[in-house]
Image (tube, rainbow, N blue to C red):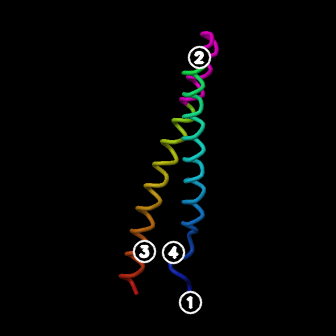
Amino acid sequence: MNKPLVDRIPFVKIVVVLAIGFAVSLGLCGLNLVLGLINGGSAAQGKLLVSAVLFEFAGMILCGLGLVVTFIAWIILFLVSRSSR
């Protein structure tokens, strides 16, 4: 007999990878902001810092949305698999 779909998808691994990505992006974004506030620097350094912060912020948003979608899919598939048995 085949296992239900909720048991075949590695939700825990997906959540762990997305959580690590979110944490790394959050840490790098905060580190860049702190370094920018402390160091001041030239206009070229400021542009580089802003672009790095924007990429890290985008990573945080994508990982956060991925976590939300994964949790919703996990709950829906769990409820559907339990009701079909």
Label 1 to label 4, Cα distance in Å?
A: 12 Å
Q: Residue at x 48, y 42 (%)?
A: 61
Q: Earlier in the sequence, mark 3 or mark 1?
A: 1
Please identify the quadrant where the N terminus is shown: bottom right
Q: Earlier in the sequence, mark 3 or mark 2?
A: 2
Q: Which residues are magenta?
A: 41-54
Label 3 to label 2, Cα distance in Å?
A: 46 Å
Provide the residue designation for mark 4: 5
Q: What percent of the width, then of the height, locates residue 62?
A: 50, 44
Label 2 to label 1, Cα distance in Å?
A: 58 Å
Q: Is residue 21 above or below residue 79?
A: above
Q: Is residue 70 above or below residue 26?
A: below
Q: Residue at x 53, y 76 (%)?
A: 7
Determine which quarter of the picture holds residue 46: top right
Q: What percent of the width, then of the height, locates residue 71?
A: 44, 62
Front: mark 3 or 1: 3
Q: What percent of the width, then of the height, locates residue 14?
A: 57, 60
Determine which quarter of the picture holds residue 24: top right
Determine which quarter of the picture holds residue 34: top right
Q: Does dot 1 land on a helix, a strand or a loop?
A: loop
Provide the residue designation for mark 2: 47
Sort mark 3 into few (<14), some (14-19) or many (20+) by Cα contacts within 10 Å: some
On whether residue 4 falls in the magenta region, the answer is no
Mark linked to residue 1: 1
Magenta-drawn stretch, dominant element (helix, strand or loop): helix
- Under mark 3, the amino acid is Phe
Front: mark 3 or 2: 2
- Under mark 1, the amino acid is Met
